[in-house]
């Protein structure tokens, strides 16, 4: 019995140290239960240590898998958040500072992929809205400039537009000029 306990004790201690939360409490209860039974004189219970160790290892593997899955999910969210942050940074010059800071706070506060995607959608909409405002402003400036030009040169519109020479006509005229100069 002492030998079985001496062999199982370091392994069980390592398992208890590695586990956390409910699995740790479950293993601790099992160890306490077997120890209490052995202390009452049921020495044959010492042979349950290997099974207890196997159960502890199983709990440890489950916890390890769950931790790895949580880490993968957190990494995926970080990648999504980084993509959204890049999108917001690229759109920064087009957006007003208050909108940029509000969207940045919303992106940092997002805890799920759906929330991050919603913020990305809002960034896209804000950029499209800013671009349409810029386009309308540019069109107004172009219209104002055209109007000024038309008012400044009303005679230019009254004259008939001369037909432009084609490149073939220019070559023909140049050839005639060169022939005249060569003959003179």
Image: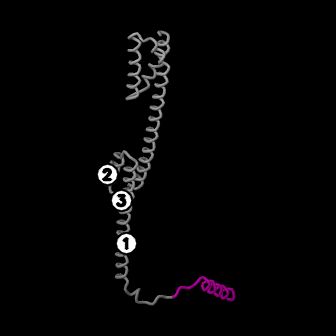
How many neighbours does mark 1 have within 10 angstroms: few (below 14), some (14-19), or many (20 or more)?
few
**Residue stretch rendered in magenta on the structure:** 163-184
Question: Circle 1 is placed at which residue position?
Answer: 139
Quarter of the image where the C terminus is located:
bottom right
Marks 3 and 1 sit apart, C-alpha to C-alpha, by 20 Å
Q: Report the residue that reaches farthest toward the left.
A: 98
Q: Earlier in the sequence, mark 2 or mark 3?
A: 2
Callout 2: helix, strand or loop?
A: helix
Does residue 1 lie above or below 161 as drawn?
above
Q: Earlier in the sequence, mark 2 or mark 1?
A: 2
How many neighbours does mark 2 have within 10 angstroms: few (below 14), some (14-19), or many (20 or more)?
few
- Percent across and percent down for residue 98 are 30, 53
Q: Report the residue that reaches farthest toward the right.
A: 183
Q: Earlier in the sequence, mark 3 or mark 1?
A: 3
Callout 1: helix, strand or loop?
A: helix
Numbered disc in front, either 3 or 1: 3
Q: What residue do we see at 48% from left, 30% from top? A: 61
- Percent across and percent down for residue 39 are 39, 11
Marks 2 and 3 sit apart, C-alpha to C-alpha, by 12 Å
Nearer to us in this view, 117 or 52: 52
| Left/right of residue 98 with respect to residue 49 in the rendered view | left
- Percent across and percent down for residue 107 are 36, 48
């Amino acid at each position: 019995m002492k030998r079985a306990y001496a062999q199982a004790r370091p392994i069980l201690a390592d398992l208890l140290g590695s586990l956390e939360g409910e699995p740790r409490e479950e293993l601790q209860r099992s160890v306490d239960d077997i120890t209490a039974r052995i202390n009452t004189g049921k020495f044959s219970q010492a042979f349950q240590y290997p099974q207890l160790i196997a159960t502890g290892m199983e709990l440890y593997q489950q916890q390890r898998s769950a931790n790895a899955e949580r880490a993968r999910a957190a990494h995926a969210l970080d990648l999504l958040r980084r993509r959204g942050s890049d999108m917001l940074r690229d759109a920064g010059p087009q957006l007003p500072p208050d909108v940029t800071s509000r969207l940045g706070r919303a992106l940092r506060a997002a805890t799920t992929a759906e929330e991050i995607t919603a913020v990305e959608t809002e960034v896209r909409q804000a950029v499209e809205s800013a671009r349409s405002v810029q386009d309308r402003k540019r069109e107004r400036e172009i219209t104002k400039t055209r109007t000024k030009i038309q008012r400044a040169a009303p005679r230019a519109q009254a004259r008939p537009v001369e037909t432009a020479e084609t490149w073939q006509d220019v070559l023909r005229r140049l050839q005639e000029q060169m022939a005249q100069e060569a003959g003179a």
